[in-house]
Image (spheres, rainbow, N blue to C red):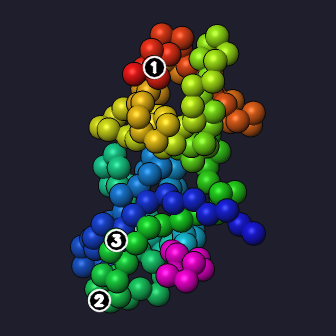
Amino acid sequence: MENFIVVGRVTSTFGLNQELKVETYLPPKEWKGIKRIFFKKKGGDYVPFEVEKLKAHGKKWVVLKLKGVDSQEGAKKFIGAKIFLPQEDLPKRKEGEYYFFELEGLEVRSNSGEYLGRVSGVVEVKDNVYLEVNGGKVLIPFTKVFVLEVKPDEGYLVVADMLKELFDL
């Protein structure tokens, strides 16, 4: 069974060519080469659509045209829908780069080895990324100063000891 990951959300139609404006959760350049995307039906099944045309539109947007969607009315039906890709179709990350879903659920340990909690979510505010730990009770900036090691294959990450005090509040 394929593992699907949400990679964007349709926010509006774009122009007069039945194109869709998509808020992307990947850098727009990483959409290059994507030929097929999926939408999730209410029953839970994923439905593939062929991408006819795709272009970056600023830092957080792409504009795409789906094959077979040939009317403005048809395009409007996708507004608000999340876009998915099979996990194995995601672009490979460089060393030290991670998808948000790879960080969620990781155990958080201090540099001295103490268990502090689990990553319950990842939040992006402007150009900054924060790890929500223990249901959002603690936010940790995802920077090299605070997050010293990330070991997704081993199920944990290591944060600087100076952050331990945040967990005692």
In front here: 137 or 33?
Answer: 137
**What residue sits 44% from the left and 27% below the top?**
140
Under circle 3, the secondary element is loop
Specify whether residue 143 is in view.
Answer: no
Q: Is residue 118 above or below residue 53?
A: above
Tell me how far mark 3 sits from mark 2, CA to CA: 14 Å
The quadrant in which residue 36 appears is bottom right
Q: Amino acid at mark 1?
A: Asp
Residue 152 image position (x, y, % from top left)? 68, 36
Q: Residue at x 49, y 37 (%)?
A: 134
Q: Considering the numbered disc 2 on the image, is that residue within a helix, a strand or a loop?
A: helix
- The residue identified by callout 2 is 73
Amino acid tagged 2: Glu
Task: Tell me where residue 23 sits by quadrant.
Answer: bottom left
Q: Quick one: SS at disc 1?
A: helix
User: Is the magenta region chiefly helix, strand or loop?
Assistant: loop
Q: Which residues are magenta?
A: 39-46
> Residue at left 71%, top 66%?
2
Kindly report the distance in space between the C-alpha atoms of the residues bearing marks 1 and 2: 54 Å
| Crowd rating for badge 3 (residues with CA inside 10 Å; few <14, some 14–19, many 20+) | few
**Horizontal and vertical percent position of residue 127:** 34, 34
Q: In the current view of this chain or complex, which residue is farthest to the left? A: 15
**Alpha carbon separation for disc pair 3 and 1:** 40 Å
Q: Are marks 1 and 2 in contact (CB under 8 Å)?
A: no
Quadrant where the C terminus is found in the figure: top left
Question: What amino acid is at disc 3?
Answer: Gly
Q: Which mark is residue 80?
A: 3
Residue ID for mark 1: 168
Instruction: Specify whether residue 60 is painted magenta.
Output: no
